[in-house]
Image (cartoon, helix red, strand yellow):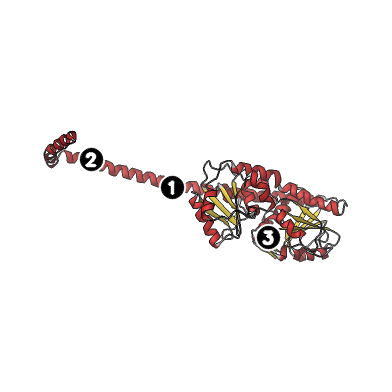
Amino acid sequence: MRVLLSHENFDGFGGTETYVLTMAQEFQRLGHEVAIFSPNRGAMSEHARTIGTPVLAASELPAECDLVVNSDAATASDLAAVYPSSVRAFVVHSTDFALQAPPQLDGIVHAVVVLNDRVGRMVKARAWHAPLHRLHQPITLSRFRDLGPPRTKARVALISSNYVAGVRAEMIEHACRGAGLEVRWLGTSNPSPFPEAAIADADVVIGLGRSVLEGLAAGRAGFVYGTLGADGWITPERYAAMESDGFAGMSRPEVIFDEDALTAELSGWRSDLGELGRDLVSAHHGAREHAVAILSLADEYVGSPAPEPTMLAEIGRLIRLEWARHGEVINSQRYTAQLRAALEERDDRLAALGADVWTLHKQLHAVNVRYEGLKTTRRYRLAAELARPLDRARALLGRGG
């Protein structure tokens, strides 16, 4: 099947951009011919190209397409005119931005997909919408599967967010430090197409939406905290309500987190939270199952068989998959180099500490030698003789007391 995904701004490393690239890769792995369309390209587009997923301008669009997966209203309208006979699905990622609201004109999209009930309620409240389909936020589980086990005691908290700033940022930083956690940031000030490296060295991942789910996929404890709300630890008991809310931090409106409450909640870390979270993500958020559900929309709304792939198309797909795997290997090598540098730095610090200990040992030895030498002098012996009556007097007074 020929699949085209779209997003108006395929530039930064945000949640919608990551969703689009995640699904493009899954469609490719399932054997489909895939491309991404974006009028505004940037860092994310370059990253997608480096791992074998083409990102196209309007002048580069293919002549035909079987399935279009839109993530914004602007490209949905553009592509409805270009591909009137294709099946067109619209994935809604936000309740906040008009650009990401589904079109209210019949014929632009055939189906609307929502990733949580909170967004689903917003879509249902609109004057009109195409048929609604409820799926889960997809995570490429294999990316986060082998990042090593968490520590037996939580030491590092990774705050993964493009939005938390100002007072909210200060509050969560102070709370983490109050709970004995070192704080690291991943997001606007420190963007990366490879969050795996930062997650691997963390024990707790703090964030919203897919960022906290990626932490769970790696077996790290997930803590939901954002710009408006805070739900705390993701546990099997809390999962259903949090997932319905899209892990947006507002599934527990009765709880108001201040710094003291956040510190107390973070201090409740348990070593089993990561593994329990990994099970939840594996059961409900696999990207492969999500891709299959999206592809099934083509059959549901058209039912016609996809064109038989050509040998050249299949060779091209395999080459792109190999290149994507090559990108993952390069990222692993970079992470290994970072670990090696960190170990070398630690060894240098240990060597420096060892040298300091040896210096202190030599200084202490020198003091002992001087003291032993002082004991052999006439002045020391005379002082000791003069002090002996005083020592006896103290002893007598002590026994008398």
Residue at 70 percent across and 61 percent down: it is 95
Q: Is residue 145 visible?
A: no
| Labels 3 & 2 near each other (Cβ < 8 A) | no
Question: Tag 3, which secondary structure?
Answer: helix
> What amino acid is at disc 2?
Val
Describe residue 57's horizontal placement relative to residue 358 as left or right.
Answer: right
Horizontal and vertical percent position of residue 53? 71, 55
Residue at 52 percent across and 59 percent down: it is 170
> What amino acid is at disc 3?
Ser
Neighbour class for label 2 at 10 Å: few (<14), some, many (≥20)? few
| Labels 2 & 1 near each other (Cβ < 8 A) | no
Q: For mark 2, what is the residue?
A: 369
Describe residue 375's horizontal placement relative to residue 136 as left or right.
Answer: left
Task: Kindly give the residue lying farthest to the top in the view shown.
Answer: 399
Between 397 and 223, the one lying in front of the other is 397
Q: For mark 3, what is the residue?
A: 45
Horizontal and vertical percent position of residue 230? 60, 54
Horizontal and vertical percent position of residue 283? 70, 43
Q: Earlier in the sequence, mark 3 or mark 2?
A: 3
Describe residue 194's horizontal placement relative to residue 378 as left or right.
Answer: right
